Image: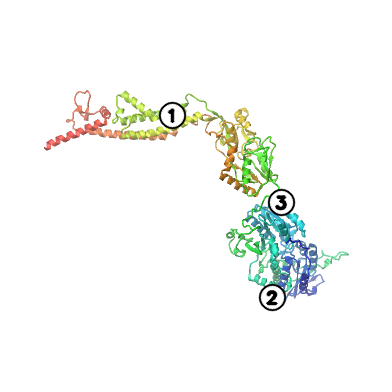
Amino acid sequence: MVGFLIPKPCHITTRGKILFFIVFSMWVPMEVIGRTGNGNASSSSSRPSSVKIGALFTYDSVIGRAAGPAIAAAVDDVNSDPSILPGTTLNFVIRDTNCSGFVGTMEALQLMENEVVAAIGPQSSGIAHVISHVVNELNVPLLSFGATDPTLTSLQYPYFLRTTQSDYYQMHAVADLVEYYGWREVIAIFVDDDYGRNGISVLGDALSKKRAKISYKAPFSPGASRSAINSLLVGANLMESRVFVVHVNPDTGLTIFSVAKSLGMTAGSYVWIATDWLPSVLDSTEPVDIDTMNLLQGVVALRHHTPDTDLKKNFISRWKNLKYKENSPSGFNSYALYAYDSVWLVAHALDALLNEGGKFTFSNDPKLHDTNGSMLNLSSLRVFDGGQQFLQTLLRMNFTGLSGEIRFDADKNLVNPAYDVLNIGGTGSRRIGYWSNYSGLSVVAPEILYTKPSNSCSNRHLYSVIWPGEITATPRGWVFPNNGMPLRIAVPNRVSYNEFVAKDKSPPGVKGYCIDVFEAAVNLLPYPVPHNYIMYGNGKRNPIYNDIVQQVALNKFDAAVGDITIVTNRTKLVDFTQPYMESGLVVVAPVQKLKSSPWAFLKPFTIPMWLVTGGFFLFVGAVVWILEHRFNNEFRGPPSQQLVTIVWFSFSTMFFSHRENTVSSLGRVVLIVWLFVVLIINSSYTASLTSILTVQQLTSQIEGIDSLISSTEPIGVQDGSFAWNYLVDELKIAESRLVKLKNMEEYSIALARGPKGGGVAAIVDELPYIELFMSKTNCEFRTVGQEFTKSGWGFAFQRDSPLAIDLSTAILQLSENGDLQKIHNKWLTYNECSMDLSPADGGGSRLSLKSFWGLFLICGIACFLALIFFFCRVCGQFRRFGSEDEESIETEEIVHDTSTSGRRTLRSTSFKDLIDFIDRKEAEIKEILKRRNSDNKRPSQSSDG
């Protein structure tokens, strides 16, 4: 099939005329409702025998062919039902609007000449706008089963009632579909009239709430030619979005898909969403047209949802046999149900009004009179006196019709709006879910969800979709078309730190670490991304990065690539990718080498530390000598030799080179504890001395951001950096203290001069810059304190750009496979600087007694306990000595190898005796005690014998 031509605007056919005359035969003469009074009013003294109701629609149209038979069937059903309007017959006056606003207006005026109490229709939103002014003047309620323009429910049209669903809800359903599948941009194709424009306007508002938008609007005039639609779709195909929302009239909509098919726009990667016009066309077409279905494969469409009740099923079974259809095609669609219910709504309201004693009277409108020579006959138009009362009666009606519950909300819209979500494929369509204003998208019918709490309906879900091209994976929704414009990417034209980004004479015109990361990420995308780099800045000073981000937000550029920090105020304007480099603000200050000193070896410890350490060496040596003196010959000898042994042993333990062995248990315990203390002291001394001999010293009192804030000295900031705003706005540092620096040379000069020489006390900048700066200046400057912000560098895109998401995934992939580190090593390989710093007073590395008093306490306790145990043991032995018989033991046995005269016993011992006893060897004391025991046993054996 070559394609569909847009048919000529609807015209009256023979079939339409037959329908017109069939219904016209139901009319009654005007005189049925008699004139009373002076001729200015017409009334009925009792329940009228008949009431006139008008109908306005286009006979030969998709909606008209469904509405006409349904209205006629409803009139018959009402008139044959004795339970409603007993004794009163409904008579219908039908007019054909012929798809023309002008004709529709004329037909509406002629309809009002018949003094109808209500008018059903029209199906066109444009005609409804015009006719609403007429019914407002004549107080005649207008019930439209097909005009879905959301603006018709405004306060401007009080007599307009919509008996179908408003496009306000349909467009929110479309927006929910777009959000559900993760798309951010759509292209709207619509007929440029009240119906199309106002519906798409609501769609734009609904999408904005979902952080999506209409990226391109493609309107066409009613009755546009095929060539005009071809040009329209060619232009739309140049856009990036591949999600098309088609909101057109049922009678001309298929031409859109016919042209799209010829342009190759119904293949894979395209998404087509049609509003309720498309299911209306397909439902009313019998038999199925294979050529038409081939155009629509993969299309997602919305259809008015009507519950599958027995009432609806019975009516559908009657449809083929309705006498009003004659030999016309099937024509059935959801509008037939709404048209049928509109008649019953009027009937119920009339019955309620008559039961309340309402009257149907008409009066002349003094504002409507014929001018001289006028042929309009405006004086024949009369005002319905009970129109306001009848309108209120209509609004409070509540009954169940073919389309479901008929009840109006405060905005005069039908309650419980809902739609079926269809996926067209093969020779028909399948329902993949529902949408309702109550529960959103769901696979459960709305009438079931109405019985559940709203919070239990929050899980959105739809069945799988077969998209154009017979693919099941959800299309990305956007591409870079081959004939599309390349991305305009802003690149900061830096004058320093060119390792990150710089201008280049060879293609692509820029180079640097940031550029290589971006190119590597783009190469990982499953689609091409044509792009051009545009330098931003004059090249004489670094550009202001906030301005670059602002230009992207204003659509001057599509993206910005470079060393752009992700900060809060920028994220409010653009979307950033995943950070590809960690960053944060640090403080860098000047440092200098500490001058060497011949007494530098004394600096690791404070004076009290030296004194206590030396004292403990002597103390522990003395304790070990006491514990070893009775057991170990190496700790015996003349007093001078023993004093040398104590000193030598004490200080030789510092190097673990003591030659004397310890044999007593208590001596070994004390020595183990002391050697542990010595190990800690040695290690700490070595580390502190190394730090003192190698550390650099700060030349100012700045030790971090806190001391920098509290000072009044000038601070250096990189030109164009966000650090300026951060220091002023967040840390409340006066701008007069900040100095802009353009490059590393200015950094070095400003820090070397210092505040007194016209320089700065410190520089605040991002860590990647500072690391490179310190490396290139041979670590003459160092960072002080910690990073006081945490952020990162990313690529900036316009809000809701899908590229930001895809590139974030690509950056993560680069990080995982190691390519990101390889790019870093290519551009940013530098020597790391030690972070060991000493404050300006130089005392930061000295070790004090405060750090080691716990060790000395443990050692002192161990020595004290060992001495107590030792003396307790010695005292016990000394007592055993004194308990022997003083007469049987000669004094010379106790005082061996000494020159004494006379005899004395142990009972007359003195302190000198105790000292002498302690000075004796342990083995000798044990031998004497053993000999005494044997001598005592020998006399006792002799006496026994």
Answer yes or no: do the residues labelled 3 and 2 have beta carbons within 8 Å?
A: no
User: In this rendering, does residue 817 appear at all?
Assistant: yes
Say which residue label 3 marks. Answer: 238
Q: Secondary structure at mark 2?
A: loop
Say which residue label 1 marks. Answer: 608
Q: Nearer the viewer, residue 812 or 850?
A: 812
Q: Secondary structure at mark 3?
A: loop
For the residue marked with disc 3, what is the amino acid?
Answer: Leu
| Above or below, 901 relative to 760 | above
Badge nearest the viewer, 1 or 3: 3
Badge nearest the viewer, 3 or 2: 3
Q: Secondary structure at mark 1?
A: helix
Label 2 crowd (10 A; few <14 / some 14-19 / many >=20): few
Label 1 crowd (10 A; few <14 / some 14-19 / many >=20): few
Name of the residue lying farthest toward the front: 1
**Between marks 3 and 2, how big is the CA–CA gap?**
59 Å
For the residue marked with disc 2, what is the amino acid?
Answer: Asp
| Above or below, 528 relative to 171 | above
**1 or 3: tag closer to the N-terminus:** 3
**Between marks 1 and 3, how big is the CA–CA gap?**
83 Å
**1 or 2: tag closer to the N-terminus:** 2
User: In this rendering, does residue 361 appear at all?
Assistant: no
Residue 779, position as x, y percentages in the image: 56, 31
For the residue marked with disc 1, what is the amino acid?
Answer: Pro
Residue 555, position as x, y percentages in the image: 70, 46
